[in-house]
Image: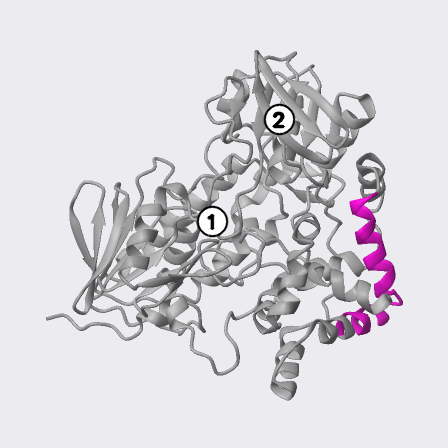
Amino acid sequence: MTAWIAHENFLLLIGASVTMPALPLRAHPSFEGVLPGESAAGEGWGTAPVTARLTGMDIAIIGGGAATVALLDTLATIADGPATVTVFEPSARLWRGRPYGPDLDTVLVNSPPALMSIRHADFGHYAAWLGERGASHLDELLGQPLVPRALYGGYLEHTAEAAIAALREREVTVRVIGRRVTAIARAGERLVLRTDDGRAHEADRVTLCVGGGTPHDHYGLGGATGFVADPYPLARTLDRIPARSRVAVIGSGLTAVDVVVSLAARGHTGPISLVSRTGLLPHVWQRPLDRRPREVTVDRVTALHRENGTVTLDDLVRLMRSELAETGEDFDDVVADLLAAESEPPTERLRRQLATVDDPALGRRVLQETAHTVGPLAWRLLPEADRALLWRRSRLASSLVSPMVPVNAAILLRLLDGGQLHVTAGIREIQAAQGGFRLHGAAGTSSADVVVNAVNPAPHAVPRAAEPLAASLLAGGLATAHPDGGLVPADPRLAVVGDFAGGGPFITSGIPGVAAQAARVFPAVSGARQPG
């Protein structure tokens, strides 16, 4: 029975991509994205060379958010010229993307500074830029500055501008075209990009950085009065919510936490409900400790693969047991605690996790870190049956590896204790009714005046605005659709960075993930086309 429990829930180790690892605040090795001896040029992943030979090349980057900032920052350190880099981005939020535009100060970065560096493997890059600005945004429980996302957007802008200046010194011209790319096709040795104004642009290499999807309207409420389809930016959407109204927030993850915390900061006095199928809140960040995993590592998993030709969940469980045994902890106890999240009342669990922010036990921290550093490799090595098993508790995995910051957790607990906030699981249907909404679930029927859609997009979802582009890539054979979502390049001239990349695990990529991917794109352009 114990072995089955470990098997069933080891998704908490491997069911994630490199997003927000709970690791010591210093540099750490991360997954290289390819199996030993495997070339990943078609995916845009590999080991970055010291210098990328870009002479005479035209490089196109589709999208102008954080992933593109990471690409430009990487190029600024390895590129030579003359060459041209063209960024296609129709939005006014250049370099910030959807998450880091102007918004309320209550919409915080959900990770400590060391986990938000857009420069791969330089975990002090963002902290150095932040400097004294972080002092006024200290989360005293976590002991780290947690700034508004709009301020982090300023860091992305600064990094992009510095990278462009450095590229120009290397004779690399950087252009920004404010149009949307709607199609890509082959044209001999080059690729032709078609923009929404009908113009054609040629390139030698193309990288897609189109961001993630938008929340799905699971209950068909689009167009109903009082329904907020996409909460961001909260500064705009919350203005339309009366202070005394009954608010139902669909979802119970980090986006839902943002909505609740921001409503409270704006003085909302009406009742607020977090409604979802599971009612599972994110875990709470613990203070980072300076202890690195020694057993559950990329090297150990790679060695297992070389020795046995495969890696199974049983193998990973043995490594995890050995890891925790070194600290005197029992893996079964850790798993039992995590499983309790599915049945323990949310208020009690939140109170208990806030009380253990300083707990020296390593079990949860090790699971979070190895989910990100080892998880992507392990996911690719596992048999299909094991991966299918892990999907069964993907929501529990998400709650662990994408935790909320203690300052927000404390606000939620205050609202729960005061009776203004409720968490309701088992929601089956939401209907627009006369002057409001009716919510039907396992606990019965309730009402709301306003419904805010805070459901996270499906993993590897195609952003709505990128659907024509994705269709052209599939039709032209430049990419294939992965069965779990996202695109897999079928042409070495194409790369994908971010959650749009198919073939990864089921947790959305965050800043460390896109930074790691961006650092590995440019080996694919090392075979440069010479001018003339």
Query: Front-most of 311 and 388?
Result: 388
- Could you say whether the residue bearing mark 1 is in a helix, strand or loop? loop
Task: Find the magenta span and give its range.
Answer: 319-343
* Placement of 393 over or under 521, stated as above or below: above
Kindly indicate the quadrant of the structure image that contains residue 171: bottom left
Which residue is painted at 72% across and 41% down in the image? 280
Residue 447 at what x, y percent from top left?
A: 67, 18
Which residue is painted at 63% across and 62% down in the image? 388
Left or right, 466 with respect to 223, comes to left
**Mark 1 — residue?**
461
Residue 224 at what x, y percent from top left?
A: 49, 20
- The quadrant the N terminus occupies is bottom right
Is residue 108 among the parts visible in the rendering? Answer: yes
Query: Front-most of 152 and 502?
Result: 502
Number of other residues with Cα within 10 Å of mark 1, as a class: few under 14, some 14 to 19, many 20 or more: many
Furthest residue in direction bottom, as rendered:
307
Task: Kindly identify the amino acid type of the residue bearing the numbered disc 2.
Answer: Ser
Label disc, if present, on residue 262 of the rendered structure: 2
Tell me, yes or no, whether the highlighted magenta stretch contains residue 327. Answer: yes
Kindly indicate the quadrant of the structure image that contains residue 381: bottom right
Residue 222 at what x, y percent from top left?
A: 47, 27
Residue 301 at what x, y percent from top left?
A: 65, 77
Left or right, 55 with respect to 363, comes to left
Tell me, yes or no, whether the highlighted magenta stretch contains residue 345. Answer: no
Cβ atoms under marks 2 and 1 closer than 8 Å: no
Is residue 361 among the parts visible in the rendering? Answer: no
Left or right, 174 with respect to 292, comes to left
Name the main secondary structure of what is drawn in magenta.
Answer: helix
Which residue is painted at 69% across and 41% down in the image? 405
Task: Kindly identify the amino acid type of the residue bearing the numbered disc 1.
Answer: Ala
Image depth: mark 2 or mark 1 in front = 1
